[in-house]
Amino acid sequence: MTYEEKIKELVASDIIEYAKWISADEFIVWIYYFNLDDFIDKIKEDFGTYPFDEGGFDDVVMFDNMIAINLCALLEGYTTEHFKEILSYKDFE
């Protein structure tokens, strides 16, 4: 499976509660805390540990029952333009 397919599969999975482009360079996924371990395991399985190297990443917002993560920032090995090709604005407005 290609990385593009893995990103699409992740966003479509039951792990992600909601996903949306909130700006030109921020694709946010909302994850309930009870799914967070599964999300981290899936990221490591599909993309390796680099998103969590050197202290992790800091583009998150925490709510009382879920966390919002900028997927573009988490998977910074991909450009925002690449994300726009994989996850169209039309599908995630």
Image: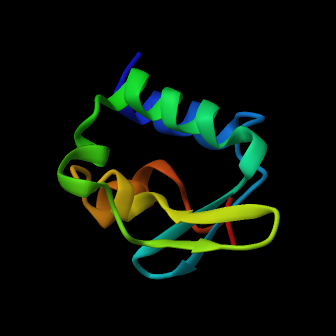
Q: Residue at x 58, y 68 (%)?
A: 89
Q: Position of residue 80 (x, y in %)?
A: 32, 65
Q: Position of residue 10 (x, y in %)?
A: 58, 36
Q: Position of residue 13 (x, y in %)?
A: 71, 34
Which quarter shows the C terminus?
bottom right
Q: Residue at x 62, y 43 (%)?
A: 11
40 vs 3, left or right, is right
| Residue 3 to residue 51: above or below | above
Along the viewing direction, whichever of 55 and 7 lies nearer the viewer: 55
27 vs 38, left or right, is left
| Residue 10 to residue 29: above or below | above
87 vs 38, left or right, is left
53 vs 93, left or right, is left
Q: Residue at x 31, y 55 (%)?
A: 56
Along the viewing direction, whichever of 76 and 33 lies nearer the viewer: 33
Which quarter shows the N terminus?
top left
Q: Residue at x 29, y 28 (%)?
A: 48
| Residue 60 to residue 83: above or below | below
The colour style of the image is rainbow
Residue 90, picture quadrant: bottom right
